[in-house]
Image: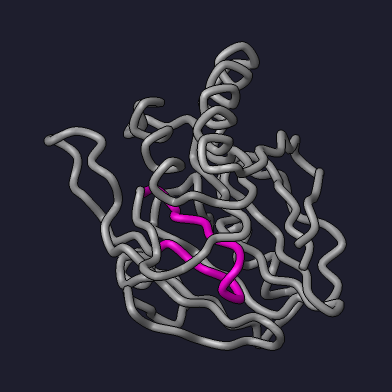
Amino acid sequence: MRITKHEHACLRVEVDGQTLIIDPGGFTLPLEDLHGLTAVVLTHEHADHWTPEHLARLRRHTPDLPVYAPEGVASAGADVIVVKPGDTVTAGPFTMSFHGGRHNVIHESIPVVDNVGVLVNDAFYYPGDSYAIPKHTDIELLAAPVGAPWLKIGDAMDFVLAAKPRRAFATHDMTLSRIGLDMHRSRLKWATEQHGGEFVALEPGESVEL
């Protein structure tokens, strides 16, 4: 399994020539090389995690493309297969289970929306905009949010400490300056290493293999 980081929160997972796309949002450049496009996961309705333009482009490439997302995305007008925490679905070589249920609080004046973290093939986990952790799962690779209006770096460190991944990399990062990104990555690296894990610094377009 190969995981590629794209801009901000967008991730590409490839297994046996097939491709799963997660959270192609407004801070992500148009995706290319969509060979074997099999499914899409949208963790929640915010525009930095999906846009109608990205979804239309992906569906022009693969007209029958299944897109899995929580109820809030469907309510926002997207044609998706609604999933909720506790659900498990399979598309091609990808088995995806969904966790959490709610977006982290940004501010009391801003409504809290649906959010699902996704665990792919019991190995790779991305929480969306939350700190939800799958129960009774050894996480081989964690995509850990590193910069957001709802995120304090100490809480992100605690999330990584609790998840105890074997490897981790930072994502959800377009709101940070270069200096801020490097500083926050160093904090997540420390947290990953406390339980013997390895932190990988991925730039957009770079990949890690499982």
Which one is nearer the viewer's eye here, 115 or 60?
A: 115
At which x and y percent is residue 64? 65, 87
Q: Quadrant of the N terminus?
A: bottom right
The answer to whether residue 157 is left or right of residue 14 is left
Q: Is residue 50 above or below residue 121?
A: above
Q: How many marks?
A: 0
The residue under the point 39% across, 42% down is 159
Quadrant of res 127: bottom left
Q: Is-magenta flag for residue 36? A: no
Q: Position of residue 55 (x, y in %)?
A: 60, 65
Q: Viewer-proximal residue, 61 or 10?
A: 10
Query: Which residue occupies the extreme top position in the image?
Result: 179
Magenta part of the chain: 117-130
Splitting the image into 4 quarters, where does residue 36 fall?
A: bottom right
Q: Is 125 positioned to the left or the right of 152 in the image?
A: right
- Residue located at (59% from left, 26% from top): 185
Tell me the quadrant of the picture where the C terminus can be found.
bottom right
Q: Nearer the viewer, residue 110 or 177?
A: 177
The image position of residue 123, as x and y in percent, is 60, 67
Relative depth, front residue between 189 and 6: 189
* Residue sticking out furthest to the left: 108
Colouring mode (rainbow / by chain / secondary structure / one colour):
one colour
The residue sitting at 71% across, 47% down in the picture is 5
| Residue 109 against residue 44 in the figure, above or below | above
The location of residue 155, given as percent across then percent down, is 34, 33
Q: Residue at x 65, y 55 (%)?
A: 11
Above or below, 95 relative to 40? below
